[in-house]
Image (cartoon, rainbow, N blue to C red):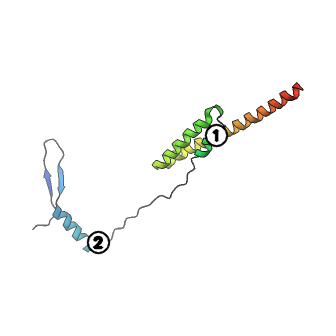
Amino acid sequence: MNHTPQAFVTTNAGLPPNYERLKEEYEVAELRGPHSSAAVRTTMINMPNKVSLPDHIVWSLFNTLFMNFCCLGFIAFAYSVKSRDRKMVGDVTGAQAYASTAKCLNICVLVFSILLVVITIITVTLVCVNTV
């Protein structure tokens, strides 16, 4: 029996050639591999560390429910969800971009809501003082 590697080419009209590997060729390559005196090949797989990327979803949900100034809290919540989706897919750069936008929107909502509460308190106290 001849154990030399061979490939059969089947010609199909207009189609690319179809190469089929013979079973004998595979067995010969399998048997020849470990017993050869060639250098040993090693494969190194770099596994990325689990990146702890905050998506600010709890903060965005709080701002959506309690401090939704001009719907910015809802928009921040949408960006937080997009950030979480990107993180689940493995797109760290996209997740960081969405998380950064959500963080900026959450800060804006918080500042505007606090200013609105302070201005409301000042206005109410000035109206009450002037009416007395």
With respect to residue 20, does 37 lie above or below?
A: below
Q: Quadrant of residue 116?
A: top right
Label 1 neighbourhood size at 10 Å, few (<14), some (14-19), many (20+)?
many
Q: Nearer the viewer, residue 51 or 28?
A: 51
* Residue in view at x 18 percent, y 46 percent: 16
- Circle 2 residues within 10 Å: few <14, some 14–19, many ≥20: few
Measured as percent of width and height from the top left, residue 63 is found at 64, 40
Residue type (three-letter) at the residue carrying disc 2: Ala
| Circle 2 residue | 38
From the viewer's side, name the closer residue of 71 and 25.
Answer: 71
In the image, taking residue 116 as reference, residue 71 lies left or right, namely left
- Quadrant location of the N terminus? bottom left
SS state under label 2: loop
Residue shown at the point (45%, 60%) measured from the top left: 47
Callout 1: helix, strand or loop? helix
Q: Residue at x 84, y 29 (%)?
A: 126
- Answer left or right for 22 relative to 54: left
Quickly name the residue at label 1: 63
Q: Is 113 drawn above or below residue 49 in the view shown?
A: above
Q: Name the residue type under label 1.
A: Asn
Residue 66 x, y percent position in the rendering: 66, 38
> Is 36 above or below relative to 87?
below
Q: Is residue 83 left or right of residue 19?
A: right
- Give the quadrant of residue 27: bottom left
Q: CA distance from mark 2 to mark 1?
A: 64 Å
Residue under the image location 27 percent in, 74 percent down = 37
129 or 113, which lies in front? 129
